[in-house]
């Protein structure tokens, strides 16, 4: 969908539909909604008085204008209670309005900037949020469906601003929102792909295309090179699959050539059966999404390349399948990671931390700092935080705070879990330096403590996105399936660090 910012009056823009708004409890609409109401002989006020329009969050009332104003239709979208209105509310209401209008065959539409007047929100951030909500909210994944869609797609969104002087500034915000949303949907496409269409080689090829299209450096380590580097943990996971593993490296060089690059490390398990410690068959088909961390890194690198912040960023994605083949890793086996540490494999379904261990070692060899790893790592994090929120842990509080703030700005909820020394006891092994599973209790924390053994003293944060990476039912402006979570968080983090680097 093409997005433009124009100056003018929303009642005079010739489009299939215009979107205006109403806070809950408002009896007489003002501003642009009031202007539309007046032009339509008070129909909005009448419907408010009759209780048909209440202004509840995501409520959409569609009116036909019958030629009295230029837009053929008007969607009055409810903003909810004024005191609870946020930028995420904007994403949600734009999604609701766009989905309603798509069903009516609308091809082009105009909207006012929700929340920038009576809502008290910053106009630039509001524009970014409404673009994100529109594009993310209209997402579908139909690649493998042969039946034609029931509805066509909306092709153009016009954001109407009365003040001509602000158009250029708001265009920049709209572009940022477009970049964030398109990158998020790109990650969703990767995660929604069946595992036979998104093998480790396919992930590498996708990353190569992103690098080629957006001017990034790209390289990939093959199994032989991983062996030479001593990546025994990653290769141990890969040995049960016929698909060759790939270690993907993407570089954005936009800052001081002498500065250490920010490092993103994304888990890329393209299908996770659990290995010999096999998962239950119910919902195993969703394990195609165990590479959501890797997809988030690739998509964020694309967004960063488009936005061009003054910073260097390197994305690493160790990619493999975890299958119970004849050569598969067995419970009780001992592996040696790239840094020489030995790992007892207590559970072959705790494979994500194994491939991340070698990836973090490799990140340190490249002197990447600070580091963020992103992974659908533990069911324990879902038990703790559900499907709404990602967990974050780390060895540097400033870094953790930056990650949480970056998520908030992108509408992605993140909650910090503790990384107390006492939890290290859970990972003690009697036959190796460390074991890969600390047991049932505090599983998200013991997993992070395992990773801390490999990030060592580098400022580091770990994002466990197991819950919000893949939804089993619609949630706000996100439909069922892959969400692209962490793409906006990582991109916002890079933008923030470009302006103010970590000092520790």
Image (cartoon, rainbow, N blue to C red):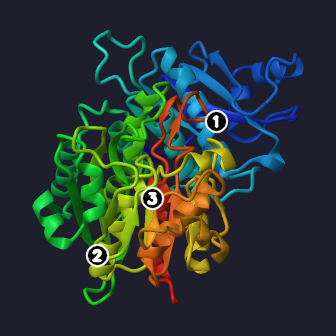
Q: Position of residue 447 (x, y in %)?
A: 53, 61
Residue at image location 39% in from the left, 18% down from the top: 152
Of circles 1 and 2, which is in front? Answer: 2
Q: Please, is residue 163 above or below residue 316 in the view? A: above
Which residue is label 2 attached to?
254
Of circles 3 and 2, which is in front? Answer: 3
| CB-based contact (under 8 Å), mark 1 and mark 2 | no
Question: Residue 374, which numbered label?
Answer: 3
Indicate left or right for 12 with 1 as reference.
right
- Front one among 251 and 164: 251
Gap in Å between the C-alphas at discs 1 and 2?
35 Å
Gap in Å between the C-alphas at discs 1 and 3?
29 Å
Question: Residue 93, which numbered label?
Answer: 1
Residue 251 is drawn in which quadrant?
Answer: bottom left
Q: Please, is residue 434 above or below residue 193 in the view? A: below
Element type at mark 3: strand
Mark 1 vs 2, N-terminal side:
1
Q: Position of residue 343 (x, y in %)?
A: 39, 66
Q: Is residue 496 visible?
A: no
- Front one among 492 and 395: 395
Gap in Å between the C-alphas at discs 3 and 2?
22 Å
Of circles 1 and 3, which is in front? Answer: 3
């Amino acid at each position: 969908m093409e997005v433009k910012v124009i100056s003018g009056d929303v009642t005079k823009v010739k489009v299939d539909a215009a979107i205006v708004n109403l806070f809950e409890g408002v009896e007489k609409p003002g501003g642009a909604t009031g202007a539309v109401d007046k032009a339509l002989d008070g129909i909005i006020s009448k419907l408010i008085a009759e209780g048909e329009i209440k202004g509840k969050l995501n409520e959409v009332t569609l009116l036909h204008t019958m030629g009295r104003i230029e837009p053929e239709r008007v969607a009055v979208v409810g903003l909810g209670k004024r005191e609870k209105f946020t930028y995420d509310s904007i994403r949600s209401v734009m999604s609701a309005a766009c989905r309603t209008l798509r069903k009516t065959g609308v091809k082009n539409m105009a909207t006012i900037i929700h929340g920038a007047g009576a809502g008290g929100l910053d106009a630039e951030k509001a524009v970014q949020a409404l673009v994100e909500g529109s594009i993310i909210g209209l997402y579908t994944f139909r690649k493998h469906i042969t039946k034609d869609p029931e509805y066509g797609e909306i092709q153009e969104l016009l954001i109407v601003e009365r003040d001509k002087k602000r158009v250029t500034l708001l265009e920049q915000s709209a572009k940022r929102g477009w970049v964030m949303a398109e990158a998020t949907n790109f990650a969703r496409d990767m995660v929604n792909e069946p595992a036979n269409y998104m093998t480790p080689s396919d992930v590498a090829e996708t990353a190569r295309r992103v690098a080629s299209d957006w001017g990034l450096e790209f390289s990939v380590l093959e199994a032989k090179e991983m062996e030479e580097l001593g990546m025994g943990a990653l290769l141990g996971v890969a040995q049960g699959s016929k698909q060759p593993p790939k270690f993907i490296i993407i570089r954005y060089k936009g800052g001081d050539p002498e500065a250490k690059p920010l490092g993103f490390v994304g888990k890329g398990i393209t299908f996770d059966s659990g290995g010999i410690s096999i998962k239950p068959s119910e919902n195993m088909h969703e394990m195609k999404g165990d590479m959501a961390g890797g997809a988030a890194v690739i998509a964020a690198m694309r967004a960063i390349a488009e936005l061009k912040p003054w910073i260097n960023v390197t994305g690493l994605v160790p990619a493999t399948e975890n299958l119970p083949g004849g050569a598969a890793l067995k419970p009780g086996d001992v592996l040696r990671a790239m840094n020489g540490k030995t790992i007892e494999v207590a559970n072959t379904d705790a494979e994500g931390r194994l491939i991340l261990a070698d990836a973090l070692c490799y990140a340190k060899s490249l002197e990447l700092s600070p580091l963020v790893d992103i992974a659908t790592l533990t069911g324990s994090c879902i038990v703790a935080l559900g499907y709404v929120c990602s967990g974050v842990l780390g060895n540097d509080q400033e870094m953790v705070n930056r990650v949480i703030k970056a998520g908030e700005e992108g509408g992605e909820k993140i909650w910090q879990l503790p990384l107390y020394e006492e939890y290290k006891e859970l990972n003690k092994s009697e036959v190796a330096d460390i074991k890969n599973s600390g047991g049932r209790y505090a599983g998200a924390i013991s997993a992070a403590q395992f990773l801390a053994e490999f990030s060592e003293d580098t400022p580091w944060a770990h994002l466990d996105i197991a819950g919000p990476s893949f939804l089993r039912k619609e949630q706000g402006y996100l439909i069922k399936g892959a969400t692209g979570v962490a793409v906006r968080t990582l991109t916002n983090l890079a933008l923030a660090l470009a302006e103010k680097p970590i000092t520790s």
